[in-house]
Image: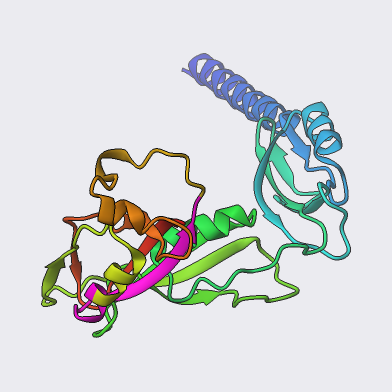
Amino acid sequence: MRHFFRIALRVLILTAVFLASTLTAMRFAIHGREVAVPKLDGMSTGQAERTTNNNGLLIEVENRFFSSTVPEGRVISQLPPAGEKVRRGTRVRVALSLGAQKMLIPNVVGQSQRAAELNIARRGLELGTVAVATLPGYPAEQVLAQSPPASAEGIASPKVNLLVSAPDPNAELYITPDFVGHTLDEASRAIAESPMRFGKVTTVKNGGRMGAHAPTSPQMAKTASPGKSPLIVKQNPPAGDKVPAGSMISFEVVR
């Protein structure tokens, strides 16, 4: 019996030693796969990528901001921060500098959402958050407010956030007339007697083609001659669209 207990005790001791060794080996293995995140602030994207790769890490550009102190294309901030221990293969998210603000923030309040988005994109800016609010008396998808405001200076992000009017579910809808092929004076008089509003007018070069709505009668063709009211070649929204009262109709004309 005593011999049996000695054997059992040895087995237990060996088992404990084995478990302790295994745990120690696992701990060393886990810590061996950990690395300290290098400091990337101020580095170019190429330098930051090489540094992270050399440490077994990956890099991801998550955002871009204006900065009057950090040159364009350099790292402004990083996450995880420098010095933190992470596993190999971890992605380090960085924000890059756009340099000092050079872009002028356009005024898009009062424009349609689509026109505002195009205006923002033309300036090299990004569309940020678009919030929607229901306000009586405003046409659907009209920009009510923007952030940052027009001509703002010292902004941090190149994104412009918009507050846009939502369609009023109780609003009466009107069918947009077809103004293409008519003069701007004719459209102006018709809109003045309608629940719609006169919008932006853009003059385009007369390339000789006006599509299916080209004027065919001598009287209509005469209106496109010099000194006469410009001839409408395109309208937005197009004819036949259903729009709420107060909606603006914009035109492209030739002289």
Task: Farthest residue to the bottom: give it.
Answer: 136
122 shown above or below 188: above
Residue 87, position in %: x, y?
A: 67, 35
On the question of residue 180 being in view, the answer is no
Asked if the magenta segment contains residue 202, the reply would be: yes
Residue 12 figure quarter? top right
Residue 157 figure quarter? bottom right
On the question of residue 203 being in view, the answer is yes
Residue 211, position in %: x, y?
A: 31, 39
Q: Is residue 227 left or right of residue 16?
A: left
Residue 132, position in %: x, y?
A: 34, 71
Residue depicted at x 39% and y 38%:
209
Which is more toward the observer, 18 or 70?
Answer: 70
Residue depicted at x 60% and y 69%:
106
Q: Which residues are magenta?
A: 190-204
69 shown above or below 170: above
161 shown above or below 45: below
